[in-house]
């Protein structure tokens, strides 16, 4: 039986992944690991939760022991823009935290999901249809920790037999919990402002093209890679995954089909723009398709349609 710990359980992905896993594997079998972000009542009431700082290895080990955990979805992380403001903290959480998780997984025989990102690529990486295996000279601290995290996770698999698997997430769009401190956050904020005020000031240039994915596909990909037949995996850490490639201009046009009066202006944040400019325009996710049958359900119009519908209901409450 799977006994799962999700670190970063109150975050953008963690909050929805925890509920998704609870539905699939049983509420009691999924422990919400929370730290700085306050969890929702729904998260606290639907199953066990524990305060977990991944930088504290003995507390982490005690949680794994207490709940007899055998699978860890390690989502606790500092994102790209916060990472540039505080690179030391990004290293501590993203690298020391991951190291602690992998060490505990080695000792207690847990499998581990390790998220990577489009940020694991850099300016020298081919920008379009970025291959699975290519140049990874990341230039942000977040990206550096993601490249190192991919290598460390592969190392723990090869050297110690720990079942580590990961995805290179694109920007994730969702309406449940706001992202915090990322460069792709504009693609979530734009929906809130479109519905609430009918206007949005974007911090990235209109033609900044990046890969994105809607939350239901993110949840599906995360669980599918963990459930995949290990004998079919040539790669592990981490698979390129994507659903569509989009820029602020294109996203605005798509939103305008639903809210014709929507207006976007631009005030460029130089730090975030430089981060985005160092990342690919689009990923080639054929390895994920081949090795574990990855296929997204939402293209750009389907995502925008669902996002506007669900977020409008949420904001009316
Ligand atoms: N969404 C993340 C960020 O913008 C990328 O992994 O930091």
Image: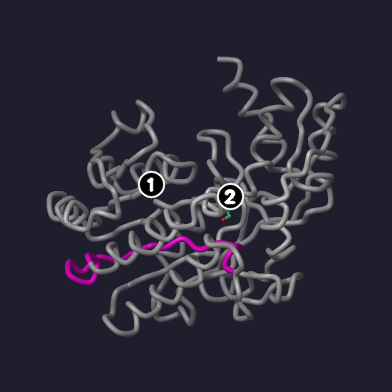
Image location of residue 196, percent across then percent down = 69, 20
Q: Dividing the picture into quarters, in which one does residue 200 lie?
A: top right
Tell me if the residue at label 2 has its CB under 8 Å from ligand 1.
Answer: yes
10 Å crowding of disc 2: few (<14), some (14-19), many (20+): many
Q: Mark 1 and ligand 1: say if the CB distance to the nearest ligand atom is below 8 Å.
A: no
Q: Would residue 247 appear left or right of 185 to someone viewing this image?
A: right
Numbered range of the magenta stretch:
104-120
Residue 81's tag is 2
How many angstroms separate mark 1 from mark 2 (CA)? 17 Å
| SS at circle 1 | loop
Query: In the rendered structure, are the residues bearing label 1 and label 2 in contact, judged by CB atoms less than 8 Å apart?
Result: no
| Residue position for label 1 | 8
Question: Residue 208's spot in the image, x, y percent?
Answer: 78, 54
Residue at (66%, 28%) from the top-left corner? 192
Whole-percent x and y of residue 258?
80, 29
**In the picture, which quadrant includes the C terminus?**
top right
Q: Residue at x 63, y 49 (%)?
A: 183
* Position of residue 24 in the picture relative to residue 64 (left or right): right
Up-down relation of residue 304 to residue 96 (above or below): above
- Residue 77 vertical placement versus 117 (above, below): above
Residue found at x 84% / y 29%:
263
Of mark 1 and mark 2, the one earlier in the sequence is 1
């Amino acid at each position: 039986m799977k006994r799962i710990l999700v670190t970063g359980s109150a975050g953008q992905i963690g909050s929805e992944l925890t509920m998704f896993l609870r539905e699939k594997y049983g509420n009691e079998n999924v422990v919400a690991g929370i730290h700085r972000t306050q969890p929702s009542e729904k998260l606290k009431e639907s199953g066990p939760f524990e305060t977990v700082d991944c930088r504290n290895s003995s507390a982490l080990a005690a949680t794994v022991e207490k709940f007899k955990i055998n699978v860890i979805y390690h989502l606790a992380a500092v994102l790209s823009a916060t990472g540039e403001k505080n690179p030391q903290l990004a290293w501590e959480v993203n690298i020391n935290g991951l190291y602690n998780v992998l060490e505990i997984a080695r000792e207690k025989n847990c499998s581990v999901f390790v998220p990577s990102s489009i940020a694991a690529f850099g300016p020298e990486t081919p920008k379009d249809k970025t291959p699975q295996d290519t140049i990874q000279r990341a230039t942000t601290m977040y990206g550096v920790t993601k490249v190192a995290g991919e290598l460390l996770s592969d190392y723990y698999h090869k050297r110690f037999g720990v079942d580590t698997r990961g995805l290179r997430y694109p920007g994730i769009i969702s309406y449940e919990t706001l992202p915090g401190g990322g460069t792709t956050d504009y693609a979530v904020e734009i929906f809130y402002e479109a519905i609430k005020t009918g206007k949005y000031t974007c911090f990235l240039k209109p033609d900044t093209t990046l890969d994105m994915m809607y939350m239901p596909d993110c949840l599906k990909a995360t669980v599918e890679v963990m459930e995949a037949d290990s004998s079919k995996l040539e790669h592990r850490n981490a698979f390129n995954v994507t659903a569509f490639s989009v820029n602020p201009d294109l996203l605005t046009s798509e939103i305008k089909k639903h809210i014709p009066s929507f207006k976007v202006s631009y005030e460029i944040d130089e730090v975030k723009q430089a981060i985005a400019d160092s990342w690919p325009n689009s990923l080639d996710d054929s390895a994920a398709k081949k090795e574990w049958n990855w296929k997204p359900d939402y293209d750009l119009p389907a995502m925008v349609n669902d996002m506007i519908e669900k977020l409008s209901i949420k904001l009316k409450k």
